[in-house]
Amino acid sequence: MSNQTPISSVKPFFKTDKPWEVLLDNTDFVKIFLSDVLGDYILKQRWYGGKSSRLKYIELAEYFKIQQHGEVYFGLILEINFFEAFYQHYFLPIAFVTDDDFAQNDRILPISINDQKGFIIDAINLESFRKVVFERIATATPIDTTKVQYHKSHLFQNVSYESSRFMGLEQSNTSLVYNEKYVLKFFRRIFANKNPDYEMSRFLSEKKEYKNTPSYLGSINLVDSENENITIGLMQEMIPNEGDAWDYMLRELHKVFSNLEYKNINIDALPNTELYQRLSIADIPPQIIDWAGLNLFTQIQTLAKRTAEMHIALGSEFEETAFTPEHYNGDYTVWLKNKMLYQFQNRLNIVENNMHKLEGLALDLAHEFLDKKNSIRKRFVAFDWTKLKGERIRVHGDFHLGQVLVKDNDFFILDFEGEPESTIRDRKVKQPPLKDVAGLFRSFHYAIYANVFNNSEAHYPASQEALFHASEILYRYITGLFLGTYVQETQNANLNLGYNQERIFILKYCLLEKAVYELGYELNSRPQWAVIPLKGISNIINH
């Protein structure tokens, strides 16, 4: 079903004598809804990811009913086409309401159906819709062969609806909290394939019983007209928590840097260590423990163990081909190099166009980046799979401190959707597990520097240069301890990361990729922070 009328800004009051249940069979309604109304509405939504492109027209790719006991809602799959010659798909559930006071900020279209005036709204605003979805998952049969397939886990038994609410502001998805115990994530931007978050969550929770991620409880998938399986929603347990690991680290790091004055620590006298050395707590000098506190390091150890356990679970599958480990090969190398070189060229252009926004150390490091662009490019091309003995597995793919919840001195890992910039197919490519470790290391680097940026003038008596020096020392001990713990755990479980030189090569490769990726974001949105990825790049190319 297709309609390609250009977008305009008219908001008509639409009248029809057709009942709501067959409204989407009405071509006049669909035409007005897609061309005159929806574009304006979608542009205002937080979950809409096409704001930097020019919307050309919207097509209705699919629609289906979400219903129970005579209550009918529609799920729409919208294909949004852009002038830049690409398209994206979005999920929008709709409902008809007649209460004039309801959902005033989320109305899509005023409409009269059989002389009953009301509004079409995003159905997620309606508690009755949220209840229907919950009950459809809770009462799902083991095998569902209908167009809209509801599934429930063996962990989701004998539950009944009590309450529902929005979880809070989110970018790309909408999450609902049910009974203050469960979370249903509706995927807004969707792909013609199972969502990696659904696949990974179900695999880790049901098949591997990995305890440090929210348990998989159920899902909603749509089988589209081309027989593709599309994930619409993912139900998981809600983990009561004390916030995410990013906020936790910032609080801990503030204590560490406050200790410089409180404990009268001479930064120049602090012992340093090599980057990427594998350390145990016994290897960390007493002066560093005295400065940073033992608690920080024991928490880093715990996070390293949970990360290792996740990878051990992901790397121990020999039946389900989507999760069986693979060796490096030429196909992977071609895919990786193409991806990396494209991204690197894009970031080079951004740096060249944004030099005027930089000053001080950031400007010096940007000049170094441009001066050494050929050697950086060579590093990306030097990926020689024939020398690598380790294995690739499915990984988290977008692993950072914001994807980790803190609870009772432990860590729980969430959000397995993968890199936002990548295609769904790329997100499912098996990668070195150290890619996730590199993501976390970059996140540690960010947290340390963000703490200095956010607090230095108010709280810490040293110069910024001295604080940056202290930051690099702390970063080396944190990552060294993480690496030592992680490698020990994975080796004990026979997860094949390759030999030591190979591990360091892959870690540095992934760190460089991540820092180059971050550089584009910082230069576009907050140039004063570009020093963080630039410093990360400098560390690697000079190491």
Image: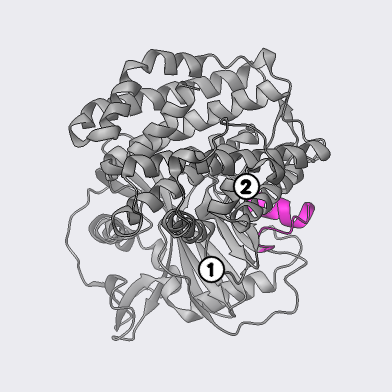
Type of amino acid at the residue the image marks with label 1: Ile
**Along the polypeptide, which appears first: circle 2 or circle 1?**
1
Q: Percent x, y for residue 249?
A: 51, 56
> The residue tagged with tag 1: helix, strand or loop?
strand
63 is higher (above) or lower (below) than 115:
above
Q: Percent x, y for residue 270?
A: 51, 41
How far apart are labels 2 and 1 at the CA level? 62 Å
The structure residue drawn at horizontal position 51% and vertical position 43%, both measured from the top left corner, is 474
231 is higher (above) or lower (below) than 169:
above
Q: Percent x, y for residue 8?
A: 18, 54
**Magenta includes 212?**
yes
Which of the pair 177/433 is nearer the observer?
433
Which of the pair 344/62 is nearer the observer?
344
378 is higher (above) or lower (below) than 437:
above
Q: Percent x, y for residue 296?
A: 59, 55
**Magenta includes 353?**
no
Q: Which residue is mark 1?
A: 66
Residue 484 in the figure: left or right of residue 543: right
The structure residue drawn at horizontal position 36% and vertical position 72%, both measured from the top left corner, is 121
Residues shaded magenta:
198-217
